[in-house]
Amino acid sequence: MTEADPRPFVGEPLALDLLNTLWLEHGRQEDLLDSPTGLRVWLAGHGLADRFPADGASLKAVLAAREALAAAVTAPGSPSAARKVDEILGHGRIRPTLTAEGPGETTEFEDPAWSAAWTAAHDYLHLLATAPDRIRLCDQPDCIRYFLDTSRNGTRRWCSMALCGNRAKAARHYARTRPARD
């Protein structure tokens, strides 16, 4: 049985959720990936715990992927960030196959320890191909979480209305009513 995910915000696409394994809680940075146990929790949250290893080598690879993705999301179009993501992607490939049902694909890894890291980097490519302008950092100043804006008009500002959106609204309300109290 896998431990419960302690993060306050989950459910983003794999690549962004990997970035969200770092978060702030009470002003302190937390890291889900501080051990192979945390890696197992993260993999289980995406239904990947049975497919990918969660050992020390895999953790090291996933941390390298998180660093590469953070660079790419922070500096879109940066050649050095793209090289970092490409290095992760260099550890696997998709091989076209023919199955009884028709055309298919098989993912192959030079080392199984890189499977989760490669899959997260590959997911980032999918996000860039489908909605690059919808990858966002939460607008709440003390939040470091990323999200994919799936709102119809593309104007979502917070990772979660319940978490950061309410804090922002409360802060605005406090600022409006404070002069009346003084």
Image (cartoon, grey):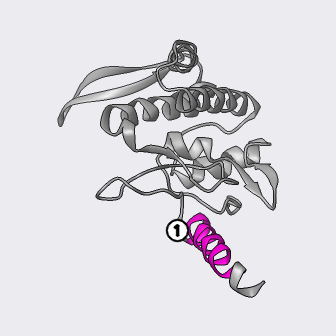
Front position in the image: 176 or 162: 176
Front position in the image: 94 or 144: 144
Q: Residue at x 62, y 47 (%)?
A: 20
Q: Is residue 169 magenta?
A: yes
Q: Residue at x 75, y 42 (%)?
A: 36
Front position in the image: 71 or 179: 179
Q: Identify the image quadrant of residue 93.
A: top left
Q: Amino acid at mark 1?
A: Met
Q: Residue at x 62, y 76 (%)?
A: 176
Residue 92, placed above or below residue 171: above
Residue at disc 1, secondary structure: helix
- Residue 75 percent location from the top left of the image: 55, 26
Q: Identify the image quadrant of residue 113.
A: top right
Q: What residue is pinned by disc 1? A: 161
Q: Is residue 19 left or right of residue 132?
A: right
Q: Is residue 115 visible?
A: yes
- Residue 108 percent location from the top left of the image: 45, 22
Quarter of the image for the N terminus: give it.
bottom right
Q: Residue furthest left?
A: 102
Q: Is residue 32 left or right of residue 11?
A: right
Residue 89, placed above or below residue 157: above
- Residue 131 percent location from the top left of the image: 34, 40
Q: Is residue 9 left or right of residue 93?
A: right
Secondary structure of the magenta portion, mostly? helix
Residue segment shown in magenta: 162-178
Q: Residue at x 53, y 32 (%)?
A: 73
Q: Is residue 41 left or right of residue 76?
A: right
Q: Is residue 172 magenta?
A: yes
Q: Is residue 50 visible?
A: no
Quarter of the image for the C terminus: give it.
bottom right
Q: Identify the image quadrant of residue 171.
A: bottom right
- Residue 115 percent location from the top left of the image: 55, 29
